[in-house]
Image (cartoon, rainbow, N blue to C red):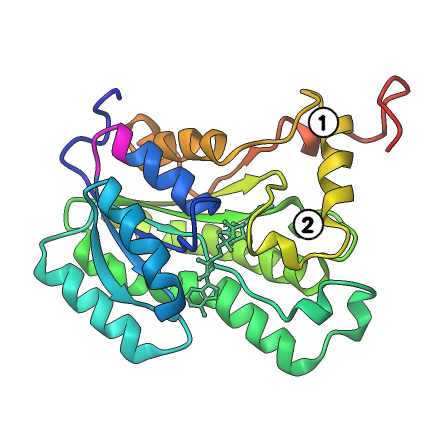
């Protein structure tokens, strides 16, 4: 690694398994020299996260469910006792699978509130808790998707949640800029993860991106991890409030190319 994150301490929220985007980011951050702390959501994921954390010599700070303030208090208390924080990664989203298919208009009030709470508000909540721990400035990063900007089939309420998340990145950047804390989002192209498996026709979406992105390929968690290393490090010291696409260029395309393969 380059050592650009040497001496930096980072908190990674959202590792579920070795296919998680958060895991790709953790590997890149470690490779560039960072010391890491992980959380896990519930005991079922604990046994997956612990060996992954151990392989990067990372600390496991405990169970964290963003809808459970007591678990959030405990995690940030542990982090505070271990010294400060230089960066954090929020790679958390949730919606009822039954509403990630069919028409957006059918979204229930209950799932709308839950999806926005877990997928958007949690980043603001975490940012507020982390601010006092970033005494020497810092970098906060969240994950978003193109469905925030344009209508994607089945993405539905999650698109609305990601649009709110992207807006909150800009407001948080304005709030925290004076403290030298930067706030950015990575907009990743589709990747087959646990969360993505809940989205209707996901295989078709992957193929569509592969055939129509300028680079004619989908992206990997390593690709996202490498872009994250830049945004988490001083290499991006004057970049904040940004939504950076790591999607093989898909977001610039207005029409399917004549030479693109049929699906
Ligand atoms: P993943 O299933 O590996 O990770 C999702 C994580 O969210 C899990 O670790 C899960 O424990 C956590 N989570 C859900 N509800 C939570 C709660 N209440 N409290 C704490 N944690 C909770 O899937 P992923 O695709 O790596 O997702 C990470 C992020 O990347 C999400 O924000 C997702 O929307 C975003 N993203 C994914 C893709 C994709 O195609 N996979 C594309 C763009 C953006």
Picture quadrant of residue 213: top right
- The numbered mark at residue 202 is none
Q: In this view, does 199 lie above or below 57?
A: below
- Residue depicted at 29% across the width and 32% down the height: 233
Q: Quadrant of the N terminus?
A: top left
- The numbered mark at residue 213 is 1
> Which dot, 1 or 2, sits closer to the camera?
1
- Residue depicted at 56% across the width and 40% down the height: 188
Q: Could you tell me if residue 104 is visible in this image?
A: yes
Instruction: Determine the secondary structure under disc 2.
Output: helix
Mark 1 CB lies closer than 8 A to ligand 1: no
| Magenta highlight range | 30-34
- Residue depicted at 55% across the width and 54% down the height: 194
The chief SS type of the magenta part is: loop
Q: In this view, does 204 lie to the left or right of 133?
A: right
Front one among 261 and 18? 18
- x, y percentage for residue 127? 33, 59
Marks 1 and 2, how far apart at CA: 15 Å
Q: In this view, does 72 lie above or below 188?
A: below
Residue at numbered disc 2: 147
Instruction: Determine the secondary structure under disc 1.
Output: loop
Q: Is residue 133 above or below residue 31?
A: below
Q: In this view, does 28 lie above or below 93?
A: above
- Mark 2, Cα crowd under 10 Å, few <14 / some 14-19 / many 20+, is many
Q: Could you tell me if residue 10 is visible in this image?
A: no
């Amino acid at each position: 690694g380059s050592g650009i994150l040497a001496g930096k301490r980072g908190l990674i929220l959202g590792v579920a398994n070795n296919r998680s985007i958060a895991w790709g980011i953790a590997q890149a951050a470690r490779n560039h020299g960072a010391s890491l702390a992980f959380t896990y959501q519930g005991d079922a994921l604990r046994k997956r996260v612990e060996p992954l954390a151990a392989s990067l010599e990372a600390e496991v700070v405990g169970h964290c469910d963003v809808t459970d303030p007591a678990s959030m208090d405990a995690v940030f208390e542990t982090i505070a006792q271990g010294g400060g924080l230089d960066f954090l990664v929020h790679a958390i989203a949730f919606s009822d699978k039954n509403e990630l298919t069919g028409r957006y208009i059918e979204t229930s009030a209950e799932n709308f509130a839950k999806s926005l709470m877990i997928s958007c508000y949690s980043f603001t909540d975490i940012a507020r808790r982390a601010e006092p721990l970033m005494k020497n400035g810092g970098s906060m990063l969240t994950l978003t998707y193109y469905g925030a900007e344009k209508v994607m089939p089945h993405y539905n309420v999650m698109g609305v949640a990601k649009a709110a998340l992207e807006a909150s990145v800009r407001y948080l950047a304005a709030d925290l800029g004076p403290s030298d804390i930067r706030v950015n989002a990575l907009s990743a192209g589709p990747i087959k993860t646990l969360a993505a498996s809940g989205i209707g026709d996901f295989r078709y979406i992957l193929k569509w991106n592969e055939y129509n992105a300028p680079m004619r390929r989908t992206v990997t968690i390593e690709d996202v991890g490498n872009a994250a290393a830049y945004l988490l490090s001083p290499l991006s010291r004057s970049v904040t409030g940004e939504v950076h696409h790591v999607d093989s260029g898909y977001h610039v395309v207005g029409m399917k190319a004549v030479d693109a393969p049929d699906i």
